[in-house]
């Protein structure tokens, strides 16, 4: 096997009778689109692999896909956080694309379209974005999840204009790119493993199993080194990375265990006297109800949703299988049902925090997030409060 580098943006690997060209692009630079077109014409590949999954390809191709969104179904199926993460990532990329006067993912669509026009095989080589997000969430430690949420929401507040020259300079410096990956690995190792490393292996496997002897892969610049290493070192492929991690049976018991713990503590409190028992019930109700209601109010949920959250959150103690967050979010959806104009303006509104809060579709998802956080904080406060009551009696 011989490895030849032709420039800083693409490499050529000769292996097992195959010629593999891997082009690293910036997903939001118009120059990347031109580079893709020129390279396809120059090397005339049998197959073009693009760093897209079917979900992302359809979303880039169909700009009005949000109009068919069934927000109630999403909430009922417990996919609200997944959809919110998708929307925030999409909004940030569109914001960057607007600053650089190019459409995000344009070079990937161009690679797909040009390959089809020239009767080339086309392979959507990336793992489904929903599986990637689900694996990131389920496999990451709690604190890493909080950091990811913080980063996602901070991206909504980014107002500084991003210049083309800055992006070009960053992409030109491979050491800077490697340093950024190194920092991500240190601060969020599991997130980096799922978002970057697993996808490097997935894409590399798609490339080496693609039909034909001459393959062109169009990927983001950040994946160039990882894919190269996976192919060059013939790293074994693990098909389990294509699946959403199945929750362990014991994790499904956690909500029950938490509920039973609080019930046991309250029963124990009543053995110390009815006054102590009622005091613990009051602590549970005030802590859970107030915390959830405050967080609902902070994101300007409907007044009735705020009131209902004060009642529903404490009831979770005796209704473990029922998610109060989902029930309250469905109530918010009923009270402020998204209008046609909300779906029509969704792409525009997603590009700012103000738009997120104004649009009824995204507002529902923000309410879901706030209520869920408020509920967990309320339970934590209740546990400390009840503990103090039992210790002092």
Image (cartoon, rainbow, N blue to C red):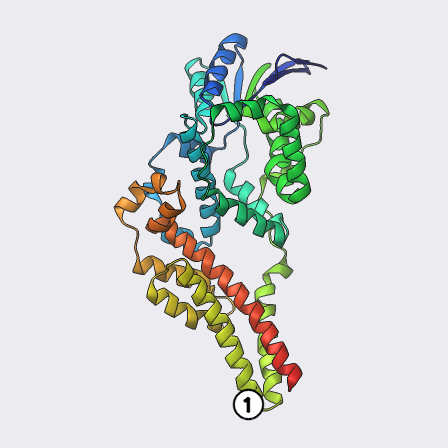
Q: Is residue 96 above or below residue 17?
A: below
Instruction: Point out the residue furthest to the front here.
Output: 160
- What percent of the width, then of the height, locates residue 90? 44, 38
Tell me which residue sits at (42%, 73%) in the image.
Answer: 311
Image quadrant in which you'd find residue 355: top left
Q: Nearer the viewer, residue 316 or 181?
A: 181
Residue at 62% in and 17% down: 11
Residue that appears at 53% across and 14% down: 46
| Viewer-closest of 353 and 239 | 353
Above or below for 354 versus 201:
below
Viewer-closest of 179 and 141: 179
Q: Quadrant of the C terminus?
A: bottom right
Q: Is residue 233 above or below residue 238?
A: above
Image x and y of residue 386, in percent: 59, 78
Asked whether residue 316 is in view, the answer is: no
Q: Quadrant of residue 216?
A: top right
157 relative position to 384: left or right: left
User: Does dot 1 land on a helix, a strand or a loop?
Assistant: helix
Instruction: Look at 48% across and 42% down and name the residue there.
Output: 155
């Amino acid at each position: 096997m011989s490895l030849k580098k032709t420039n800083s943006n693409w490499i050529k690997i000769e292996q097992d009778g195959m010629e593999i060209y891997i082009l690293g692009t910036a997903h939001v630079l118009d120059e990347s689109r031109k580079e893709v077109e020129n390279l396809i014409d120059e090397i005339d590949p049998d197959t073009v692999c693009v760093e897209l999954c079917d979900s992302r390809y359809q979303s880039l191709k169909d700009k009005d896909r949000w109009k068919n969104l069934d927000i109630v179904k999403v909430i009922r199926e417990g996919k609200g956080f997944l959809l919110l993460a998708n929307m925030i990532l999409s909004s940030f990329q569109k914001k960057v694309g607007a600053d650089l006067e190019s459409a995000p993912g344009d070079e990937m669509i161009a690679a797909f379209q040009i390959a089809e026009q020239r009767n080339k095989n086309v392979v959507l080589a990336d793992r489904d974005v929903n599986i990637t997000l689900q694996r990131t969430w389920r496999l990451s430690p709690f604190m890493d999840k909080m950091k990811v949420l913080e980063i996602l929401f901070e991206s909504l507040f980014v107002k500084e204009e991003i210049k083309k020259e800055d992006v070009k300079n960053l992409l030109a410096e491979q050491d800077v790119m490697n340093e950024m990956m190194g920092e991500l690995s240190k601060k969020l190792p599991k997130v980096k493993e799922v978002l970057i490393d697993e996808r490097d292996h997935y894409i590399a496997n798609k490339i080496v199993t693609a039909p034909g002897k001459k393959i062109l892969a169009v990927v983001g610049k950040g994946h160039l080194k990882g894919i190269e290493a996976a192919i060059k070192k013939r790293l074994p492929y693990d098909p389990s990375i294509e699946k959403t991690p199945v929750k362990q049976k014991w994790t499904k018991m956690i909500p029950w265990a938490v509920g039973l713990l609080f019930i046991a503590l309250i029963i124990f409190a009543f053995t110390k006297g009815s006054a102590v028992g009622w005091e613990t019930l009051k602590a549970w109700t005030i802590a859970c109800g107030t915390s959830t209601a405050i967080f609902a109010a902070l994101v300007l949920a409907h007044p009735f949703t705020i009131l209902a959250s004060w009642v529903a959150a404490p009831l979770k103690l005796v209704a473990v299988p029922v998610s109060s967050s989902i029930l309250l979010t469905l109530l918010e959806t009923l009270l402020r049902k998204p209008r046609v104009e909300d779906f029509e303006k969704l792409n525009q509104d997603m590009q700012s925090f103000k738009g997120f809060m104004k649009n009824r579709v995204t507002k529902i998802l923000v309410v879901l997030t706030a209520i869920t956080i408020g509920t967990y904080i309320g339970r934590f406060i209740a546990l400390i409060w009840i503990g103090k009551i039992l210790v002092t009696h």
